[in-house]
Image: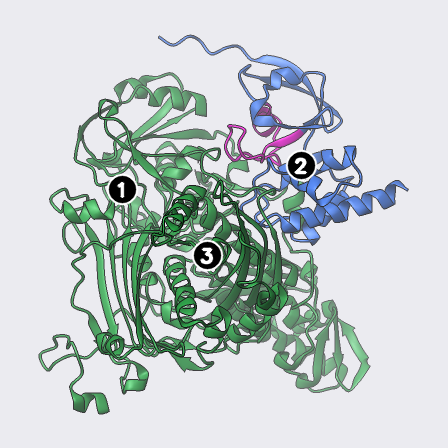
Chain colours: A green, B blue
Amino acid sequence: MSVANKRLEVVGQVRRRVDGRGKTTGQAYFADDLALPRMVQCKLLRSPMPHAIIESIDVARAAKYPGVHLVLTGKDFPVPFGIMPVSLDEYALAPERVRHVGDPVAAVIARDEQTALEAIELIEVKYRPLPTIASPEEALAHPETRIHDYGEQGNIHRNQAYEFGDVEEALAKSDYVFEDTFFYQGNTHLPMEQQASLAAVEGDGKLTLSTSTQNPHYLHRQLARVLQMPASQIRVIATPNGGGFGGKCDPANHEMVVSKAALLLGRPVKICLTREEVFYQHRGRHPVLMKFRTGVTKDGKLTGMHLQTLLDGGGYGSHGPASTFYTGVLTPVTYDLPRFKFDACRVFTNKPPCGPKRGHGTPQPRFGQEVQLDKIAEKLGLDPAELRLNMVTKPNSLTANWLKIGSTGLAECIRKVVEISGWKEKYKKLPEGRGVGLACSAYMCGAGVSIYWNKMPHSGVQLLLDRSGQVTVLCGATEIGQGSDDVLAAIVAEVLGISTLDVRVLTGDTGLTPIDLGSYSSRVTVMMGNAAMQAAERVRERIAAAAAEQLGTLPERVILSQGRVFAAEDTNKAMSFVEAVALAEAKFGTLGSVGSYSPPKAPGKYKGAGVGPSPAYSFSACVVEAEVDPKTGWITVPKIWIAHDIGRAINPVHVRGQVIGGVYMGLGEALMEEQAFRRLPEKLSNALVHKMPSMLEYKSLTSLDMPEVEVALIEEPDPNCPFGAKEAGQGPLLPVMPAVANAVFDAVGVRIDEVPITPDKVLVALEKKAKGEAPRVGPESFPPVPYPQPTFVLPPWEGGDGDELKSADGKPLRRAKKEIAIL
Amino acid sequence: MKTPAPRNVHVCLRVNGEEQQVSFAPYKTLLEVLREDLNLTGTKHGCELGECGACAVLIDGEPVLSCLVLALECEGRCIETVEGLASGTKLHPLQAAFADRGGSQCGYCTSGMLMTAKALLDHEPNPSRERIKEAIAGNICRCTGYNQIVEAIESAAVELREVGK
C-alpha cells in the first residue's frame, strides 16, 4: 500500500515534540552549557570606533598577563570570509580597518573569563579615525568615503534593476497611479541565547567546533577557508539554538577565533558573547526605504508596479546580495500583477552588518505593498478584503517575474480570517479610537538555489536500523526551536508505521550527518522532509519485502502501522515492527538507507532568476484590532486573527506555536523594536553608536503586551511538499506590521507609513489631522539612486521565454521588438 | 600591578534539597556558581543584567534572578532549580504541560519560565489568566508569543489542583 494513500497516524496528530522533554528538564545542552577538561576562555576586544584605520596594536602587556595563554590579532587571520561567495569581506579579527563599533580587533584566551577581560584592557590599539557614514543618504552623497574597496561604485554594495514588461506603459494606461514612500526601520533578532562556541582538537587530531549556528554546513566551508585546512579535518556541531530567527546564519568571527586558538593551543577554547556583543554581531533586519508606484483600474485590479528600495546594509556584505533581491522578488506572489519593475540598492554604512531576519528582505516591501493596498481600497471605496480576494494569484500559475506558484490557499485564508475576526461587523464600524486592519502575505518554502553554486542535493537524510528495532535518523538540519527534529522524526515514523518515540534523531553535525544546507529560508520541512520520506520509503520497501515472505503475502500488500507489520488482506497475519526489521536484516544484510532532495528547476532563465523560486509558497492573511489613545498616541492591540496556508500541519500544536511566534515578532517590529543609532558628541569621539545594546533598552513585547492570537490553519496539501506540508516559521510574521498600520488608520484616520509605529508618530499625525494637513507620518521623499539600466524580461503572458531580451551583440534590450514580442 | 585575586570562599548551599559544599570566588553570582561550580546548566542566562528572566530560580520559594544574587548570600537558604522539578523521571505537571502544549520552542527561556510559574502556582493554585501573564512578565520569550506558555500554566494548574484534592 502506497504511503500517499495511507491513513495518517503520526502526521497531523498533536504530539509532544521529540525534544520537548529535554527542554523542560534542563537537558537540552546549548553551546554555553558545554565544558571540557583543560578548557580555557576567550574574550574579544571590539572597536569603539565606527570607522578607523588600525595604525598599531600592542599586545605585549596582555600576552604577559598571568593566566593568559594566547593573544590573537588580525595578522593571525589573513584569509577573509563571508556567507556569500560574492561578498567575502570579513576577517575574523580586523587586520587594518574597523567598519563599525563592535568590530572585533583582538582576542585573548586565558584561564577564565575574568582573566581574559582583565588582559583585554591591556591591549593598546591606535586608531586613525575616518569619516563615518550613518545612513544610505550619506553613503550615496559621500562616495569618496569608501567603507569597502569592492562593490558597484562608491559605497554601493549591490545595485539591481529588473523590468518584467513595460511598466511605464502599464501605469500610463491605468485609471489611477498610487505613489507612496515607506520606511521600515532595522531591528534585531534578539534570540534569548547569546551565541557561544566551544572548539577542541579531539584525540584523533581533528578539530571539532560546537556552536550555536543555524547553518553548520556553510560555517564548515568557511572555517576550512579561514583556517586553511581540509574540511574533512573539521567537524561542526550545531548545538540546539536558543532561538535563531536568522541571527545565527552567518559564519561569525568568534567561531573562527576559538577554532584557531584551539588549534594553536591544543586545548579546548570557549567563548560566549555578552548580550551587548550580540547586538554588534546583529545581521538583523535591514532598514529599507521604499517607493511604490502602482497602477490600478477603477474596479481594483493591479496593472503594474514600479518598486524602488534602498537598503542600509551596515559595515559588511553578509547575506546582502540575497537581501537586496528579496526586497523585490516575492512582491508579485500574492496578487495578479501583469507588469513589475523593481530597482534595489544596498549600501554600506558604519553600523553592525544587516542580514537575514525572519522573512529576509520581504517584510519591508510587504509592509509598503499592503499599506498601499489599504489606501487604494479607501480611494476606490472598496472593502480591503474584497479588493484582495478579487486579485489573488491562481494555483499553478507564473508571476510576471517567472516564479512558479503551485498550490495557494490565500483566498481561503482571506475568507477565513474575515469570518473569525468579524471583519464585516468591525471594519469602519468600530467607535472612534478603535479599528481593524487587514493584510496578507506569501513566503517561500525554501530557497530554490543554494548559497554557493553546485549541483548537489539541498538536503540529505540517512536512516540506520538494526535487529533491536531501533531507528536512527541522521540529517544536517538544525533544531533552532522551530521543531525540525520533530518534523524529521514524524515523517520517518509515519512511513515506517511507528511512533516518534521509537525514533532517535541526530541532526546538525557535519561529522556524522548527511549535508543539509541549514535552517534558513523556511526550507527545512520541505527539503529535509522530502529527503526523509525518500530514505524511509527505501528502507520500508526492504522491511515489507522481508515481512511479505514470512506472512505469505505480496510486498505491496504489507502494511506498517502502529508498530505492527501485517498483511492487508488478513490482519492476523502479523508481526511486530522489531521482528520485521530483524527479518529484513537477515535477508538484505545491515539495514540503512539514504534519501536526498533537490528543488525543481525554476522556469526563469534570466540572470538573477535564482532568487525567489521555491518548491512551494505559503500564504497568510491577518486581521489586527487596535485601540489608539488620542491623548498619548499609545496603541493597544487586544486581539489578532491569522489564517495560514500550511498545506498540512505535521504537528498542529507546534504549527500553531510557530504562527503565534511569528505574529509576536511581527507585532514587536510593528510597535517598538528598533535597532537605532546615534552619534556621540564631538568631544566624545563623534562615534556612531548603538542607542540601546541591552534588553532593557531594546523594547520587546512581554506577556502583558501580547494579545491573544486566534489561528486558523488552512490545509490544502501541496504536491511538492512532504505529506503536503509547507512552512510556518516565517510567513505568518509578514502580514502583521501592515495590518497594524491599517488598523491604526481605521481607528483614528492617520497613516503611519513607517515601522515601528510608535506613539510619538501617532501624535504627530493626529496633530496634522487636527490642523487639516495630510494626516500622515512617513518619509517625504526618496533620494536619487543611480540604479542601473534594468534587465528586461517579458512576462509569461506577453510571449516571453523566461530569459532577458538581448540584442545580437549580447547587450540588454530595453524593450522587445514587436516580432520578438509576438513569439 | 594587579591586586591578587580574592581567595575562594567555602559555602554550604542547599540546592534542590541536597546540601552542596562549594568553593568559589566571592564575587560570583548564584547563576555562575550553579552553572560553573555545580554543573547545573539547566539555569540559563540571557543578559546577566537582570533584564530577561532566563536565570530565574527559587530562593526560599520566591522567584529571583540568579544573575543578580551573590552566591555568598545564599548560604543556608533553599535554592530550587529546573533540575529539581521532576520526581525521578516523572515530569512535574508544569514540565509536561510545557512539553505537550507548545510552551517551549527553543527551550532557552523555559527553565526560568517554569520556576517562575512554579512559584506562582505554589502560592496561588488557581490564578486567573491575567495573574499568570503578570507573574511571567519579567521572563522574556522570543519564540512562542506567550499564548501557549500561558495555556500550559493554566493546564498544569488544573492538574496540580486535581492532585491536591
Q: On screen, A370 above or below A682?
A: below
Q: How crowded is the residue under tag 2: few (<14 C-alpha within 10 Å), some, or many (20+)?
A: some
In the image, A95 versus B115, the foreground residue is: B115
Image point (22%, 74%), residue name: A168
Q: Which residue is mark 1?
A: A91
Q: CA distance from mark 2 to mark 1?
A: 45 Å
Q: Which residue is mark 2?
A: B135
Magenta residues (range)? B30-57
Q: On screen, A366 above or below B67?
A: below
Q: Secondary structure at mark 3?
A: helix
The majority secondary structure of the magenta stretch comes to loop
**Residue A272 visible in the shown view:** no
Q: Position of residue A355 (x, y in %)?
A: 35, 51
Q: CA distance from mark 2 to mark 3?
A: 34 Å
In the image, A495 versus A690, the foreground residue is: A690
Q: CA distance from mark 3 to mark 1?
A: 47 Å
Discs 2 and 3 lie in a common subunit:
no
